[in-house]
Amino acid sequence: MTLEHTENYRPISLLPILSKVLERCVFFNIKDHLFQLIQKLQHRFISGKSCVTNLLEVLDYIGSELDNGGQVDAIYLDLSKAFDKVSHSRLKQKLRMAGFGGNLIQWFDSCLTNRQQRVTVLGATSATLPLTSGIPQGSILGPVLFALHVNDLPDAVKFSQVAMFADDTKLFSTIKTKNDCEQTTDRN
């Protein structure tokens, strides 16, 4: 990583301790409901799931297909700066669809909107700019909110298997004929 490439720097929100305490209280009150909504295909931010469980499930599938003489084609997706691009309005809509409302939605709105950021590198600080999208990285609720935000991504995939680890997504399908390859590409 070189200092000349600003895209190599990740924004981390410096959040007051009091806001983190409040976030933790909210998290403990809503986590069970949120975790029930998150698809089993997601292996990040979920208790009992990890990078290892993600890899084991995919390797088990691929190994079974190879043992049966099949071939598996895979596509790997990684959303660039995924946490920073979360639409606040879309996330609030997903929270409403998840059954949250009233004061809790207003609280989420106040946590997400009217935020600003600046960057300091080698003692030089940029101008402060408003944040119009994104989830504060370093927050307590950020990871589970992101998981909820990308939760419907697998629903758009009809003819492939899906495995997710945060914003990293694998699409993979068994290919037995050339026609399978063409149809899988066209159908997804």
Image (cartoon, helix red, strand yellow):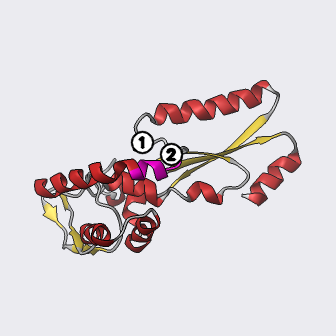
Q: Amino acid at mark 2?
A: Gln
Q: Residues within 10 Å of mark 1 (few under 14, many from 20)?
A: some
User: Front-most of 180 and 41?
Assistant: 41
Disc 2 marks which residue?
42
The correct choice, above or below, for 2 with respect to 61 in the image is: below
Instruction: Locate residue 104, reporting x and y percent.
Output: 29, 66
Q: Which residue is mark 1?
A: 46
Q: Answer yes or no: do the residues labelled 2 and 1 have beta carbons within 8 Å?
A: yes
Left or right for 56, reference 87? right
Q: Is residue 38 magenta?
A: yes
Give me the residue at 42% from left, 48% from top. Answer: 35
Disc 2 element: loop
Q: Which residues are magenta?
A: 33-39
Circle 2 residues within 10 Å: few <14, some 14–19, many ≥20: many
Q: In the rendered view, does 158 fall on the left or right side of 6?
A: right
Label 2 and label 1: CA atoms lie apart by 8 Å
Q: Quadrant of residue 65?
A: top right
The residue that appears at 35% across and 49% down in the rendered structure is 31
The amino acid type, in three-letter code, at marker 1 is Ile
Tell me if residue 81 can be seen: no
Taking the image as shown, residue 44 lies to the left or right of residue 128, namely right
**The one of 85 and 3 positioned closer to us in this rendering:** 85
Q: Nearer the viewer, residue 137 or 26?
A: 26
